[in-house]
Image (spheres, grey):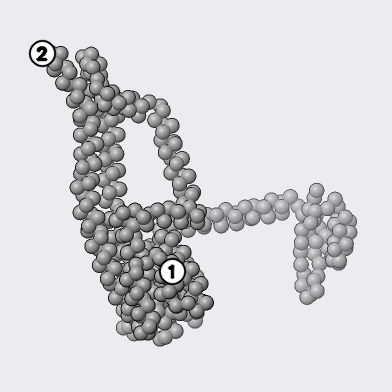
Amino acid sequence: MPAFIATYTNSRGRSVSLTLEAADATSARRDLRRRGIQVNSVERQTQAAVSSKRAAATTKANTSLLKQLNSLLEAKPGIREKAVFASKLAALVDAGVPIVRGIELMAQQQKIPLFKRALEAITLDVNQGIALGPAMRRWPQVFDKLSIAMVDAGEAGGVLDESLRRLAKLLEDNAKLQNQIKGALGYPVAVLTIAILVFLGMTIFIIPTFAGIFDDLGAELPLFTQLMIDLSSLLRSPFSLVLVAGLASVVMLFGRFYATHLGRRRVDALVLKIPLFGDLIQKTATAQFCRTFSSLTRAGVPILMALEIVKDITSNSIVSDAINQSRDDVTQGIPLSIALASKKVFPEMAIGMLAIGEETGELDTMLSKVADFYEDEVGATVKAITSMLEPAMIVIVGGIVGSILLAMYLPMFSIFDQIK
C-alpha cells in the first residue's frame, strides 16, 4: 500500500507533517477526517523518500550500536587512575588554581581516551556554570558514586581540596586491599594452571613415546601405567574435543547462574565458608566498609546515602545485601550497629566498635581505627595463606610430575627381571 505525507495545522498554530498508508489520496484525507484532523495537503511519498528515510534510520541505528560497542570495548580508568586524578586535582585546588583550569590541565595529561573525553566534557560543563559533582555524574562509566558523593560534599562544605585528598587516600587504600586479595588468590590459581599444563603436556607428548617402547618390548604393564596410557590415548583422540566442549558448557552455565541474584548469593555464601579464604574476604569487606563509611560521614555525606554507596563497593553479594537491609532498618530508627549485628556478616569486634562510636558521637574516628586494624589483619592473613600455599603447591606440582614418571618407570622393573 502506498504511503502519503499529510500536512495540517495543530491547535497551537504549528504546521505538522505525518506519514500514513492508504489506497489513494482521497482515502488518506477521509481517514484523517475520521481522526478529527483537517489536512492542508496530502502528497504521495516517493520511493526515493522512503529509501532515504529507511537509510537514515538504519544509519542512526548503526551509529548508536557502534557507539555502544565502542563504549563497552573502551578501556575504563581503574581505581589507581582515579586516585591519581583526585590527588592531583586536590593539589591544584589547594594551590589556588581555578577548577576549570585544573581539570583542563588534567585532561591534557590524561592518556586513557575515555577518561580524557570525560575530563574535556567536564571542563566545558564547569565553564558554563555547572558544579563539578553534577558534571561528573554525567559520566557514570568513569566516575563512581563514591567519587561523586565526596566531590558533592566537598563543594557543599567549601572544602573541595580536603574532600579530594580524602577521596584519593580512600581509593588508594581500596586499591591496596584489592591487590592483596588478587595476590593471595592469584598465586594458587597460577601454580595450578601451570601444573595442569605440565600434566597435559607430559600426558599427550611423553607418555605415547614410552607406550611405544613398552609395546615393542612386550612388557607387562602395571595397572597404574595402563591407566595413564589409556588417559593419554583419550586426550589425543577426537573425543577430547567433546570433553573440552563439555567443560566450556559447564563454565558458561556457571557464568549465567552466577549472573542471577540467587546464583550469586549462593556462590558468595559458599565462598565465605571456605577455610582461610572466607575469613580473608570477610576481613577485606569489613576494612572496606569501615574505611569508606568513615570517609563519607567525615566529609558530611548523610548516613543513608553513605550506606547506599558503600553497598556497591563490596564484591560479595551477601555482605552487600546485608548493608542494604541495614540501610532499610536505619530508616525505621534502628541504630546501625544493631542493624548490622542482626545480619551477622561483620566480626563482633567491628560491630562493638561501631556501637561505641554511635554512643560517643565519634563514629567516623572509631570506624577509621577499625579499618586500620582490619587492613593490618588482611595483610597478615595474606602472608599466612601465601606461606601455607607455597609448600602445598610444590607438593601438588611434584605429585603430578612424580606420578607420571612413576607410571613410566614401573614397567622397567619387569623388563629388567626378564633380561636377568
Residue that label 1 marks? 342
Choose the circle earlier in sequence order: 2 or 1. Answer: 1
Residue at the location (29% across, 38% down)? Answer: 197
Name the residue at the left extreme. Answer: 420
Residue at the location (25% across, 60% down)? Answer: 381
Residue 40 image offset from top left, x and y in percent: 84, 66
Q: Is residue 53 left or right of residue 153?
A: right
Residue at the location (44% across, 36% down)? Answer: 246
Q: Is residue 24 left or right of residue 253?
A: right
Residue 393 appears in the figure: yes
Q: Is residue 358 left or right of residue 223?
A: right
**The C terminus sits in image quarter:** top left
Residue 304 image offset from top left, x and y in percent: 47, 76
Q: Identify whether 208 is placed above or below 328.
A: above
| Amino acid beneath label 1 | Ser
Quarter of the image where one finds residue 39: bottom right
Residue 262 image offset from top left, x and y in percent: 50, 55
Residue that label 2 marks? 420
Q: Secondary structure at mark 1?
A: helix
Q: Secondary structure at mark 2?
A: loop
In the rendered structure, find residue 161 and report the number of the disc placed on it: none
| Amino acid beneath label 2 | Lys
Residue 419 image offset from top left, x and y in percent: 13, 13
